[in-house]
Amino acid sequence: MAAPTRILTLSLGTQTIGLAEFNIGQNGAVVLSSYQTRELLADPAADSTRIAQANLLLKELVQSLKLRGSKISYAVSSQSVFTRFVKLPSVGEEQVDQIVTFEAQQNVPYPINEVVWDYQLVDSGDPAQVEVVIVAVKADLLDDINDAVESSGLKTTIVDVAPMAVYNAFRYNYSDLGGCSLIIDIGSRSTNLIFIEPHKVFSRSIPNGGSAITQAIAKDFGEPFGVAEERKKRDGFVSLGGAYAEPEDPDVARVSKMIRNTMTRLHAEIARSIQFYRAQQGGAQPERIFLCGGSTTLPYMREFFTEKLQLPVEFFNPLRNVAVAGGISAEEISRSAHRLGELVGLALRGTSECPMEMNLQPKKVVRRHELAKRRPYIILAGIVVLALMAGW
């Protein structure tokens, strides 16, 4: 089936909403034609407020861009999803569903009838073994998220998981890399680690991100979360420590030290995750680091991780093999490219086969799609009945 010429994708971050439009050229090239973001003002810890606010911002975007009725693919954040990597003996295709269903029932920490779940077989490089990625999300939470998306006037097609969308974008843009690469995706409430080898993938979520910095600033300065967030954006950078001179402004120096302390705790978790990946998952030592996510924009973040991990560190560029339309400014792209991994990965789902193709569609979306598939046959049956009645 030919790929659609227009694809809309949505990133639902805890503090930022990103909406992108991609076009597919005649030669199959993926082109980013527009990109919009909106900031959420609520404390990321207030989930109910965040979903309502996201709905209002989405309605504004849909109305201003005249997108009502358009199909959309979006990703669910990692902290909302249970993910488990399971190794199974190699079995026939007819047995896979049965075995994976049993594993899901054993591993998912909720009753299986209360979640929406899916799985993906992963090439492990070992013919005697199959690796399965199982993902699950509480059905009521997914319904709340999907209602916020669809009440804005959009129609859901694919519901992906954020780290897996980033993984697809990496495979598309860095297919030439061998060895082990580690993506560190620092969001607001969590940091996603994605270990990628030619025949292996593993992800882990750490409950530490940019909002931890903001909360530390808010507590230290005795100010609301929103004011602390503005202070972080205005004055924040990762203190280099050691022999480097401190900023002259004492408040700026305080903020930079708090950021470094938070990032030091995050680094300790990352180091433990690398050890776990090597010891428990049989993975290789990472050879390079890629940074992405909204919180990586803080100055000296790259230098901090280079110093701590003693590895080459660069920013992940999901537009490496994706063209950018002339209407988007180069300045905007250079400032936002590190946030586009999910959006690009979602767009690729509509163009070709991807290494990770899970879909956590809510049950009512599944029913709607099934009805749409049956509708032509229902209409045809109705026409036949009417013709028979007319002939009679």
Image (spheres, rainbow, N blue to C red):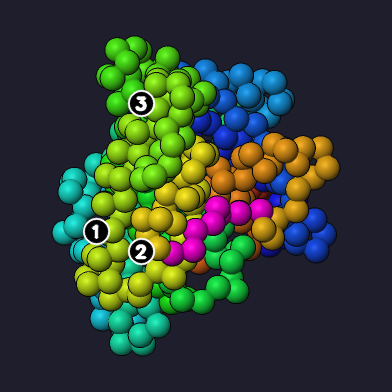
Q: Kindly identify which residue carries mark 2.
A: 202
Rendered residue at 25%/66% (across/down): 275
Residue 312 lies within the magenta run: yes
Magenta span main SS: loop
User: How far apart in space, not on screen, are marks 3 and 1 (Cα)?
Assistant: 28 Å
Q: Reply above or below: 331 against 119.
A: above
Q: Position of residue 360 (x, y in %)?
A: 41, 48
The type of residue carrying mark 1 is Arg
Neighbor class of circle 2 (other Cα within 10 Å; few <14, some 14-19, many 20+) is: many
From the viewer's perspective, is 106 left or right of 141?
Answer: left
Q: Position of residue 220 (x, y in %)?
A: 28, 19
Q: Closer to the camera, 391 or 226?
A: 226
Q: Position of residue 138 (x, y in %)?
A: 29, 40
Q: Kindly identify which residue carries mark 3.
A: 254
The type of residue carrying mark 2 is Phe
The segment highlighted magenta reads: 311-319
Q: Kindly identify which residue carries mark 1.
A: 272
From the viewer's perspective, is 303 left or right of 68?
Answer: left
Question: Element under label 2?
Answer: strand
- The answer to whether the residues at label 3 and label 1 have Cβ atoms under 8 Å apart is no
Rendered residue at 52%/23% (across/down): 234
The type of residue carrying mark 3 is Arg
